Image (cartoon, coloured by chain):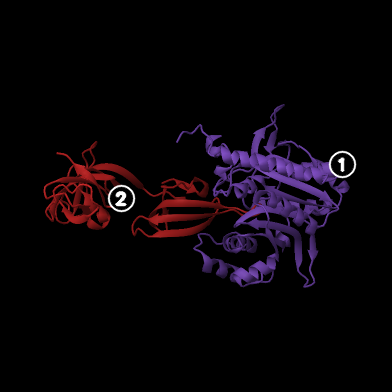
Chain colours: A purple, B red
């Protein structure tokens, strides 16, 4: 096998190109504006689970970051009055390489001022439909999928119950008292593979600890939840959608929380995006979602590996 | 030994897990768009041959195992041990039947095998993919029958039993694929 050749077949690259143009056509008919924001950014996301790739500013020696998602810049456009926008762009994440990951990947991200979460999920289904054709859609809450596949309530289960459940499903090398780590392990290793492979499954209402930049709310049972969904198809995570946080003070609180987790883990502390903080006051109520475009292409091509739908993955870059 | 982090886990990397030398078979990176990354790793315990599946948090590390694969010439079997020699250093190593395992079916003197050393001692032996061995016992050959599909068992000089076409006779040398144990062709002497 020659290393200079693409890992994807041309038939897959052609299908991918078709999918790109059909996505653009769909947004054009719905009046959503295509935008481009910088890949080279002054501040990355603070999420402790996402590590940006660092580089040096072209005009000095300050550090700059290859963006890990266009979220912050797109929110600045929304705050400036753009109306509904979408972007198809490269995003970069250090260390993320595997069957479904390449550290440089293509993100489809869009924001819809005024739409409800239910309407946004319908739009995600329409986009996924462009890749796979007619599909059935299922809606679950985070609590429901845990009750169904793990036999426990994720919001009230004790740390020991979560650990015991994880250990009953797999052989685990680590131990931690962080509940969230166990919830995430169960989600990605037990629930995700058990979701109906033939339907687009939306899971919504995440624990508030996993809110990231979503609004939170209190459900009738008194549990604080994040207004977030994830979409899964064929055993694979496809999309992450939020009812976007618009409160600048709460944003600062969450960034501090990320920073303290980063400090605990001996991770670097990236700078805070001050442009975003200033823009937050003008950010309209909106919902937003990010879809892994390479994964959408994998579905369209019935591919098992991301390498089958990108020309040159990391090792051949 | 060096430590290896989960993102350095490549197929074939030798690491220590629970005090046992293991070879990594598969490393699946599992990461939600938002959230903690994990690695689901399949490893073969090189002592027992058993396959383990273990889940790590990404970024955890394991100590490397002092395991190396080395080409060595098979010398002889003294009834208890199999003796091998490093053709470069002439250093000799003895491996017991546990280490040699099924490779004993295919060991012919002077053939070059891959010997896996753990802390300097043979842990396992992999024979060449193809070996040429003499038939020492089989039913008499059927003349002219070179095209029909029938087979018969043949005992080879190493003790292995292989299914061969009906036309072959005692004393002939055949080529065998050691990975499948299947007859390949007759070797013209």
- Residue B179, label in figure: 2
Q: What residue do we see at 21% from left, 39% from top? A: B90
Compared with residue A295, is residue A151 higher up or lower down, i.e. above or below? Answer: below
Which tag is nearer the camera, tag 2 or tag 1?
Answer: 2
Q: Number of labelled discs?
A: 2
Instruction: Please tell me in which quadrant of the rendered image residue A55 appears.
Output: top right
Horizontal relation, residue A256 to residue A232: left or right: right
Q: Is residue A257 visible?
A: no
Q: How far from the left and from the top, in percent, is residue B103?
A: 25, 52
Q: How far from the left and from the top, in percent, is residue B45?
A: 38, 57
Q: 10 Å neighbourhood of mark 1: few (<14), some, or many (≥20)?
A: few
Instruction: Please tell me in which quadrant of the rendered image residue A43 appears.
Output: top right
- Residue A80, label in figure: 1
Dot 2 and dot 1 residues touching (CB under 8 Å): no
Q: How far from the left and from the top, in percent, is residue B184?
A: 25, 46
Query: Which chain's residue wears label 2?
Result: B
Quadrant housing the C terminus of chain B: top left
Q: Name the secondary structure under disc 1.
A: loop
Compared with residue B182, is residue A198 higher up or lower down, i.e. above or below? Answer: below
- Residue B168, label in figure: none
Instruction: Please tell me in which quadrant of the rendered image residue A234 appears.
Output: bottom right
Q: 10 Å neighbourhood of mark 2: few (<14), some, or many (≥20)?
A: few
Q: Nearer the viewer, residue B127 or B176?
A: B176
Q: Name the secondary structure under disc 2.
A: loop
Distance between mark 2 and mark 1 Cα atoms:
66 Å
């Amino acid at each position: 096998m020659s290393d200079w050749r693409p890992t994807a077949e041309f038939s897959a690259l052609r299908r991918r190109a078709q999918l790109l143009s059909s996505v653009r056509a769909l947004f054009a008919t719905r009046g959503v504006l295509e935008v481009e924001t910088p890949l080279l950014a002054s501040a990355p996301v603070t999420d402790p689970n996402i590590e940006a790739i660092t580089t040096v500013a072209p005009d000095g020696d300050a550090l700059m970051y290859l963006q890990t998602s266009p979220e912050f810049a797109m929110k600045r456009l929304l705050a400036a009055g753009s109306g509904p926008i979408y972007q198809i762009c490269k995003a970069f994440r250090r260390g993320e390489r595997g069957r479904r990951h390449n550290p440089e990947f293509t993100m489809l991200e869009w924001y819809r001022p005024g739409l409800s979460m239910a309407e946004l999920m319908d739009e995600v289904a329409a986009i996924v439909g462009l890749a796979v054709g007619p599909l059935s859609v299922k809606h679950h809450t985070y609590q429901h999928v845990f009750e169904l596949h793990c036999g426990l309530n994720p919001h009230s289960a004790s740390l020991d119950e979560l650990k015991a459940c994880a250990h009953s499903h797999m052989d685990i090398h680590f131990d931690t008292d962080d509940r969230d780590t166990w919830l995430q392990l169960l989600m990605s290793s037990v629930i995700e593979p058990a979701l109906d492979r033939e339907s687009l499954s939306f899971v919504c209402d995440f624990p508030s600890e996993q809110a990231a930049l979503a609004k939170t709310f209190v459900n009738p049972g008194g549990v604080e939840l994040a207004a977030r969904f994830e979409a899964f198809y064929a055993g694979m995570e496809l999309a992450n959608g939020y009812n976007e946080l618009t409160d600048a003070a709460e944003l600062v609180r969450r960034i501090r929380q990320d920073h303290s987790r980063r400090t605990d883990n001996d991770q670097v502390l990236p700078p805070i995006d001050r442009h975003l903080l200033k823009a937050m006051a003008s950010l309209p109520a909106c919902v937003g979602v990010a879809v892994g475009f390479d994964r959408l292409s994998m579905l369209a091509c019935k591919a098992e590996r991301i390498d089958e739908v990108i020309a040159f993955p990391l090792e051949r870059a | 030994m060096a430590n290896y982090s989960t993102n350095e886990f490549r197929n074939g990397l030798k690491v220590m897990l629970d005090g046992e030398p293991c070879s990594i078979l598969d490393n699946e990176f599992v990461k939600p768009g938002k959230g903690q990354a994990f690695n689901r790793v399949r490893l073969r315990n090189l002592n027992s041959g058993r396959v383990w599946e273990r889940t790590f948090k990404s970024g955890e590390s394991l100590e490397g195992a002092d395991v190396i694969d080395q080409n060595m010439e098979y010398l002889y079997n003294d009834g208890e041990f199999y003796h091998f020699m490093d053709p470069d250093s002439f250093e000799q190593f003895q491996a017991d039947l546990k280490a040699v395992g099924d490779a004993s079916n295919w060991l012919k003197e002077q053939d070059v095998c891959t010997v896996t050393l753990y802390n300097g001692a043979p842990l396992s032996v992999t024979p060449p993919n193809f070996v040429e061995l003499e038939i020492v016992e089989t039913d008499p050959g059927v003349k002219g029958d070179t095209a029909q599909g029938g087979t018969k068992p043949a005992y080879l000089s190493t003790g292995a039993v292989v299914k061969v076409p009906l036309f072959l006779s005692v004393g002939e040398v055949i080529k065998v694929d050691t990975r499948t144990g299947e007859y390949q062709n007759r070797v013209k002497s």
